[in-house]
Image: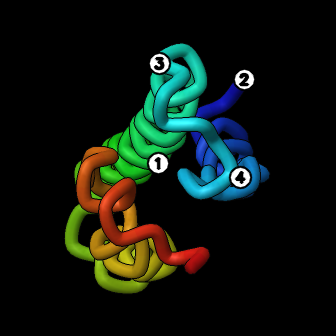
Amino acid sequence: MKSSDRLTYLLDHVRSPNVSFDDIDYNNSQDLHNAQESLLREQWIRVSALKVCRKALESCYKTSGPNHYEDCREIAEKYLNMLPDHRIQGFLGYQKNDPSK
């Protein structure tokens, strides 16, 4: 798989539904653990997609030379748009302040 195909695949990744900690029984440690793990797994997938985009941008800069402003603009915009949302936030803040409430 080419790096551009891989980048497209990771950027178009279909996200699973957000985990609602209201739907689980907090007394059941297995349900709580599964909800936490699925949320963290989703966050790591987004971080991996950000890394792939950054590596594609770096290789574009190296290969394009002085024309990188024109040639790499699309990848740079994708990378800048991904930065705020594609980071590890953990599950505690989400668990205590469930946005589905």
Q: CA distance from mark 2 to mark 3?
A: 40 Å
Of all residues, the one furthest to the front in this rendering is 27
Q: Residue under label 2, please give it.
A: 1
Q: Residue at x 45, y 34 (%)?
A: 36
Whether residue 61 appears in this view of the structure is yes
Residue 79, numbered circle: none
Q: Residue at x 74, y 55 (%)?
A: 17
Tell me if residue 94 comes above or below residue 21 in the rendering: below
Mark 3 highlights which residue? 29
Where does the image place residue 13, in percent across and percent down from the top left? 72, 49
Instruction: Using the image as rendered, state which of residue 28 and residue 1 is in the foreground.
Output: 28
**Foreground disc of the pair 2, 4:** 4
Residue on which the image places disc 1? 46
- Residue 15: numbered disc: 4
Three-letter amino acid code of the residue under disc 1: Arg
**Nearer to me, 78 or 21:** 21
What is the secondary structure assignment of the residue under circle 1?
helix
Q: Secondary structure at mark 2?
A: loop
How far across and how far down the image is residue 69, in percent? 30, 83
Q: State if disc 3 and disc 1 touch (CB < 8 Å).
A: no
Kind of residue indicated by mark 3: Ser
Tags 3 and 4 in contact by the CB under 8 Å rule? no
